[in-house]
Image (cartoon, rainbow, N blue to C red):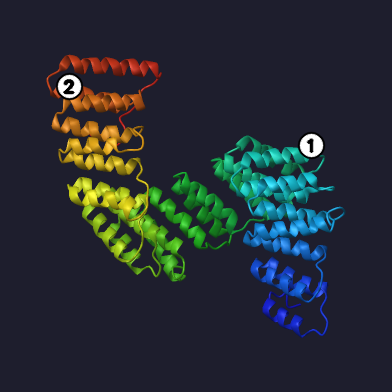
């Protein structure tokens, strides 16, 4: 009774007071801890049971394997597997065999899980579903689908649990055609009538595959739906930049008597960002405050900061961040990125210093904004220090954006030799943005020879980089070398024919 009510501490006290304990009583407690994902406590109970001289049985091993799976204790799981094999318990116990397959799968040992499955004298849909779900959890969608085919080839039919995992696999790899095929099978078997979870999995699959119209059709066809159904669709529209559709879904959801939760508000704030609708975002903000949802929800708080920042309401974004009870790197990055995108570089650096002072470690995104701010503000020494700190202080490996910012920093200031030195220290020269930055600086300072060197590398990386051709032609033209400029134009025309299409000048080009 205590176990079923979740009062495991009380259940253990009762067990201790029993004049005689057996495997059944210990199994009940171990199973309770395993069900509540308290694997360490379950293992401790197993040890106490053995200390009393009580031998584990099939049920004990089944429960303790679940406990191992819940905490990723694969070494313990292997020990129990050896003991199960030594006692020959797998010959006629498919439940125990399935527990082994599941334990290895949930611990990420998928090869071992597949090996155990293949060796089982008896298999059923639960055995295969455990392995399929293991592949999905590791992002190996194609392997999950292959596993489904093997299962069906053995004459085993998927059930709702199998289909849920398979639909996740389709979403992981964007296999829309396969997902539609699975949808047809589910409909043919009438499985949607009694499974909201399966319906939600279908909506999620279509959303992840970008088929939002189909996702909405599934939702509208469900006899029962919940907040998860709607959240999935709202999130899909928000991620695809279809903010108005996200709001339509929110209104439809509320009309059906389903109240938004924290996840709903997080998704709809993203929709406000895509629309640039700070007024709508502020109305959502008021509702969040009215419900007191910000007290312990850093994700929702971050979504608010991000929404205001992306809508350009930076004072409001700063105010929200300052009032958050919990702030993390994502909170600060949202605000810093907002300031950077609006050209408020002094505020980028101010926020960075405050963030550091509060003991929050920056990441690659933070440094991209900070170095960009230094570049646009002409802060050469500060930029050099920050760039050095990326690795020496924070252990971050500089990426192409960081190198581009440094080349731009030196290039804007006319220190082209230092810009070249940065390029020579890069682990790879296959960064188009770096060459674009150097070309822009060469145009600004009229350095034809260095510009040609940068141009040659740029088209080696991307022969169809039209911005590089335009910039080099402009450099030659500014130097009075019209023939060379015309030759570059001819090269660009030839490149366009070669690549069978035209390109627009990328954003941010200084040429």
* Numbered mark located on residue 476 in the image: 2
Report the side of 439 relative to 174 (left or right).
left
Q: Is residue 74 visible?
A: yes
Q: Quadrant of the N terminus?
A: bottom right
Q: What is the x, y in percent for residue 47?
A: 72, 71
Residue that badge 1 annotates: 153
Q: CA distance from mark 2 to mark 1?
A: 67 Å
Residue 491 picture location, percent across and down: 29, 16
Q: Quadrant of residue 208?
A: top right
Say which of 137 and 256 sits in front: 137
**From this viewpoint, which residue is outermost toward the right?**
92
Which residue is found at the position 36% from the left and 35% from the top? 428
Q: Tell me if residue 99 comes above or below residue 145 in the rendering.
A: below
Q: How many marks are shown on the rendered structure?
A: 2
Q: Secondary structure at mark 2?
A: helix
State the residue at coordinates (28%, 35%): 424
Tell me what residue is drawn at x 18 percent, y 35 percent. Answer: 416
């Amino acid at each position: 009774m205590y176990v079923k009510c979740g009062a495991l501490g009380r259940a253990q006290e009762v067990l201790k007071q029993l004049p005689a304990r057996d495997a059944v009583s210990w199994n009940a407690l171990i199973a309770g801890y395993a069900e509540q994902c308290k694997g360490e406590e379950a293992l401790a109970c197993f040890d106490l049971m053995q200390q009393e001289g009580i031998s584990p049985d099939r049920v004990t091993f089944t429960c303790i394997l679940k406990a191992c799976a819940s905490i990723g204790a694969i070494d313990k799981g292997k020990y129990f597997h050896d003991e199960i094999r030594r006692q020959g318990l797998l010959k006629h116990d498919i439940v125990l065999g399935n527990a082994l397959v599941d334990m290895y799968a949930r611990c990420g040992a998928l090869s071992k899980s597949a090996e155990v499955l293949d060796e089982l004298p008896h298999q059923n849909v639960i055995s295969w579903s455990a392995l399929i779900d293991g592949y999905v959890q590791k992002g190996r969608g194609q392997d999950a689908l292959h596993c489904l085919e093997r299962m069906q080839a053995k004459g085993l039919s998927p059930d709702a649990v199998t289909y849920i995992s398979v639909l996740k696999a389709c979403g992981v790899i964007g296999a829309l055609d396969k997902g539609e095929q699975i949808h047809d099978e589910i409909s043919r078997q009438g499985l949607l009538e009694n499974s909201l979870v399966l319906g939600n999995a279908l909506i999620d699959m279509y959303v992840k595959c970008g088929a939002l119209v189909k996702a909405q059709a599934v939702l509208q066809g469900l006899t029962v739906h919940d907040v998860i159904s709607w959240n999935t669709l709202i999130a899909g529209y928000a991620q695809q930049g279809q903010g108005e559709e996200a709001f339509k879904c929110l209104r439809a959801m509320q009309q059906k008597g389903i109240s938004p939760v924290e996840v709903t508000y997080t998704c709809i704030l993203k929709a406000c960002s895509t629309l640039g609708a700070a007024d709508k975002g502020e109305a959502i903000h008021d509702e969040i405050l009215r419900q007191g949802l910000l007290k312990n929800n850093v994700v929702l708080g971050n979504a608010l900061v991000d929404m205001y920042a992306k809508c350009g309401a930076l004072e409001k974004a700063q105010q929200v961040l300052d009032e958050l009870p919990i702030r993390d790197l994502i909170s600060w990055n949202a605000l810093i990125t907002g300031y950077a995108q609006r050209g408020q570089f002094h505020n980028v650096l101010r926020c960075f210093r405050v963030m550091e002072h509060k003991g929050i470690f920056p990441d690659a995104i933070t440094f991209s904004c900070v170095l960009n701010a230094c570049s646009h503000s002409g802060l050469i020494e500060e930029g050099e220090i920050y760039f050095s700190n990326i690795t020496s202080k924070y252990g971050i490996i500089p990426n192409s954006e960081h190198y581009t910012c440094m080349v731009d920093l030196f290039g804007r200031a006319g220190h082209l030799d230092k810009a070249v030195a940065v390029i020579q220290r890069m682990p790879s020269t296959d960064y188009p943005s770096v060459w674009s930055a150097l070309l822009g600086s060469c145009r600004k300072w009229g350095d034809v020879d260095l510009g040609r060197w940068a141009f040659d590398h740029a088209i080696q990386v991307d022969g169809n980089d039209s911005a590089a051709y335009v910039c080099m032609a402009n450099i030659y033209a500014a130097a009075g070398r019209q023939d060379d400029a015309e030759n570059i134009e001819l090269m660009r025309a030839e490149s366009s024919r070669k690549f069978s299409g035209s390109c627009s000048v990328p954003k941010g080009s200084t040429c």
